[in-house]
Image (cartoon, rainbow, N blue to C red):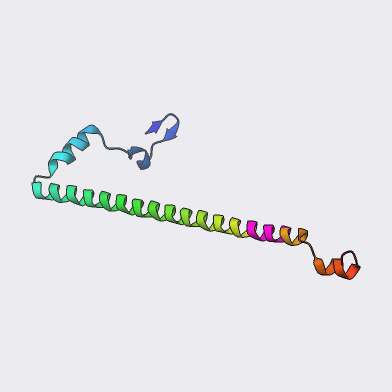
Amino acid sequence: MESGGRAVTAADNIRPFPTPQEVHFTRFSDDSSSSKDGKKSESRSTSSHTGSTLFIIFLGLVVVALFSFFLFKLWQKKKREEQYARLLKLFEEDDELELELGLRD
């Protein structure tokens, strides 16, 4: 069995998706309606659980981002106050120095 110059293996017969006939067969092969309801509720609870988990993770990331932003702004304010204090100290009049040098009585 060769197809296009190469040997056909068992892996070539594996299809990633079922055919429409297989879907139809599997859909109606289970006769108990209770197991269908159980599977549906199980998949819904799993889906709901996944959604709530993603929401909690997203909420946590938002809280961390806001907390980081708050800390950054606090750090900026502290740095700005330190720089302003250094600037004032640089330009403040030093009366003792002027008296020692005799520039002022």
Q: Nearer the viewer, residue 35 or 45?
A: 45
Q: In the drawing, does residue 105 fall left or right of residue 29? A: right
Image x and y of residue 63, in percent: 43, 55
Secondary structure predominantly adopted by residues drawn in magenta: helix
Q: Which residues are magenta?
A: 80-87
Q: Residue at x 13, y 42 (%)?
A: 29
Q: Nearer the viewer, residue 93 or 54?
A: 93
Image x and y of residue 7, in percent: 41, 36
Image x and y of residue 80, in percent: 64, 56
Instruction: Specify the quadrant that holds the C terminus.
Output: bottom right
Q: Nearer the viewer, residue 27 or 51?
A: 51
Q: Is residue 18 magenta?
A: no
Q: Is residue 82 magenta?
A: yes
Q: In the drawing, does residue 21 fall left or right of residue 60? A: left
User: Residue furthest toward the front?
Assistant: 105
The quarter holding residue 11 reads top left
Instruction: Specify the quadrant that holds the N terminus.
Output: top left
Q: Nearer the viewer, residue 36 or 18?
A: 36
Q: Residue at x 18, y 47 (%)?
A: 40
Q: In the drawing, does residue 63 fall left or right of residue 73? A: left
Q: Residue at x 38, y 53 (%)?
A: 59
Image x and y of residue 35, in percent: 12, 50
Q: In the drawing, does residue 81 fall left or right of residue 64? A: right
